[in-house]
Image (tube, grey):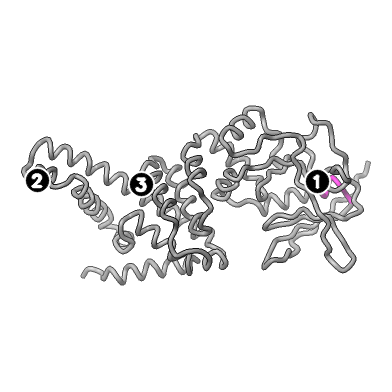
Amino acid sequence: MARDPLDVETSVSAELTESGIKASAKSRTIAAIDRLLGSFAEWASARVESSTNRHRSISGAENRLLEILGKQAAEQLRNNSDIGARATAQQLRKAIQLHERKERVIEAALDDLKRQPPAAAEASAGQAELDDAFIERLDHYSQFATTADLQERWGRVLASEIRKPGTFSQKVLRLIDELDADVAKRFEDVCKHRIAEIIPKCLYGPLTFGEEVKLVAAGLLVDPNPGQRWLSEKMEVKPGKFLWGFNFPDYAISVPTDVKLPHAKPVEEDHLSCIEAGDEGEPTIPVYVLTDEGLAIGNILADEQESAIERLAELIAKAIRPAPVVTYRAEDGKYKLVTRHRSAPDAS
């Protein structure tokens, strides 16, 4: 006995909830599937009854194809016209391919959302549907995502937009589409050391001239210069007690206000400094800086910021030993202590 489509749709909808995709985020997910594939209910049924998946894809593509071809082509097909049959078969195959690519993008998006469900604030915020312009552009790019890597890339874009609508402008979507494989791989390597919109130089190491040129030309990186630093600011941790803090949206690092800092090194030696004195004697971190577009794309990659923060704190602790270094995570508008780092005094 065939399943009730409403029961199947409800079942898959419940699966999204169990995966952590709730509230407005779930509505955005369902609406996006409906817009991209034609019917959330049909897609849900095909997903549950995998043996009919191919049949449903072909049937849906056939129906859309006949609408596109119009009455004349449909009449030719019914009359077994060789020309009409060949033309129809060719367009049918193409329609099926485009539809299946979009299905794979949807599946990649759902996998990404399951790995990293929207936070409670993200899930409940925003509209119930994604912006029409975003969906139209994603629909176009998804149809031409001919490789698994591209399908996964656009799936991550869709998942990020579901979490936080408005992340991807048309300019960013175009940039993602135009990224060649080599630049995309280099940027992904760089972003393994990303903290917010910066890459501490001491974590990634010096960019080669070729890397700089490609990443800047692609619109991902602000043209590097020796003066790019992440500045600290004094933060009051207790009444009358202050620390120097490097503050990021999700994390922070603190060092004592009486810390002895290394001075800035000559430009040619500056690349691996993890902390140094700024113009007013305050602690600074030499960094590379992502463009707004680079940050948006960085957000669809694996989030390794927590690891990057801990590694940076360890290097800072070695540079200013025996002064303590503390890392924090932002929770509910406050910074919660994560780790205290302290390196033994240099024996030399």
Picture residue at 65% right of the left edge, 47% below the top: 197
Query: In the rendered structure, which disc, 2 or 3, sits on the residue that comes first in sequence?
Result: 2
Residue visible at 40% across and 44% down in the picture: 141
Q: Is residue 299 found left or right of 76 in the rendered image?
A: right
Q: In this view, does 273 lie to the left or right of 16?
A: right
Depth check: give the residue in front, 172 or 180.
172
**At label 1, which amino acid type do we have?**
Thr
SS type, badge 1: strand
Instruction: In the displayed orientation, state which residue is furthest to the right.
Output: 348
Residue 75: mark: 2
Looking at the picture, does residue 91 appear above or below residue 34? Answer: above
Q: Indicate the quadrant where residue 49 lies.
A: bottom left
> Which residues, given as a range, are shown in magenta?
317-322
Q: What residue type is labelled 3?
A: Arg
Where's the N terminus, which quadrant? bottom left
Q: Which residue is denoted by mark 1 in the rendering?
A: 284
Determine crowd level at label 3: few under 14, some 14-19, many 20+ residues with C-alpha closer than 10 A: many
Place of residue 136 in the rendered image (x, y in percent of width and height, measured from the top left): 39, 50
Q: What residue type is labelled 2?
A: Glu
The secondary structure type at the circle numbered 2 is helix
| Rendered residue at 68%/65% (across/down) | 331
Q: Residue at x 41, y 47 (%)?
A: 137
Q: Residue 231: horizontal and vertical position, in percent? A: 78, 48
Q: How crowded is mark 2: few (under 14 residues within 10 Å), some or many (20 or more)?
A: few
* Residue 261 sits above or below residue 13 on the image: above
Q: Mark 3 points at which residue?
A: 101
